Amino acid sequence: MLRVLAAVLALIAVGCMSLAIVGMVTGRPGDRAGGLIRALAVLCFALAVVLNVIAHR
């Protein structure tokens, strides 16, 4: 179960980073929104790593 949640969080992180990159290219989201999207991506990735480590114990 933890591995599935970790995989979902990793996919969310990939989606957020994709949105952030597209936003940087197009200039659509403002600086604040882009920063929040990148912060969310980092948070999701960090949680995915932690859950993956816990699942492998």
Image: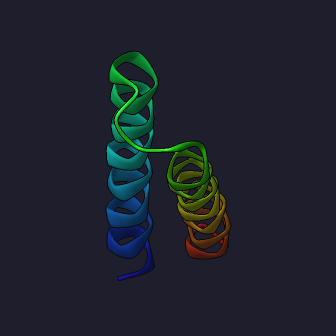
Q: Residue at x 34, y 39 (%)?
A: 19
User: Residue 45 placed where, x, y %?
Assistant: 57, 54
- Res 54 → quadrant: bottom right
> In this orientation, which residue lies closer to the viewer: 17 or 33?
33
User: Residue 9 placed where, x, y %?
Assistant: 41, 64
Q: Residue at x 49, y 44 (%)?
A: 30
- Res 46 → quadrant: bottom right
Q: Residue at x 62, y 49 (%)?
A: 35
> In this orientation, which residue lies closer to the viewer: 50 or 16?
16
Locate the C terminus by quadrant. bottom right
Relative to 20, is 36 above or below?
below
Is 45 situated left or right of 46 in this image?
left
> In this orientation, which residue lies closer to the viewer: 27 or 21?
27
Is 31 situated left or right of 29 in this image?
right
Q: Residue at x 35, y 83 (%)?
A: 1
Name the residue furthest top: 25
Name the residue furthest bottom: 1
Q: How many marks?
A: 0
User: Residue 15 placed where, x, y %?
Assistant: 32, 45
User: Residue 49 placed where, x, y %?
Assistant: 62, 58
Q: How is the image coloured?
A: rainbow
Relative to 57, is 34 above or below?
above
> In this orientation, which residue lies closer to the viewer: 5 or 44?
44
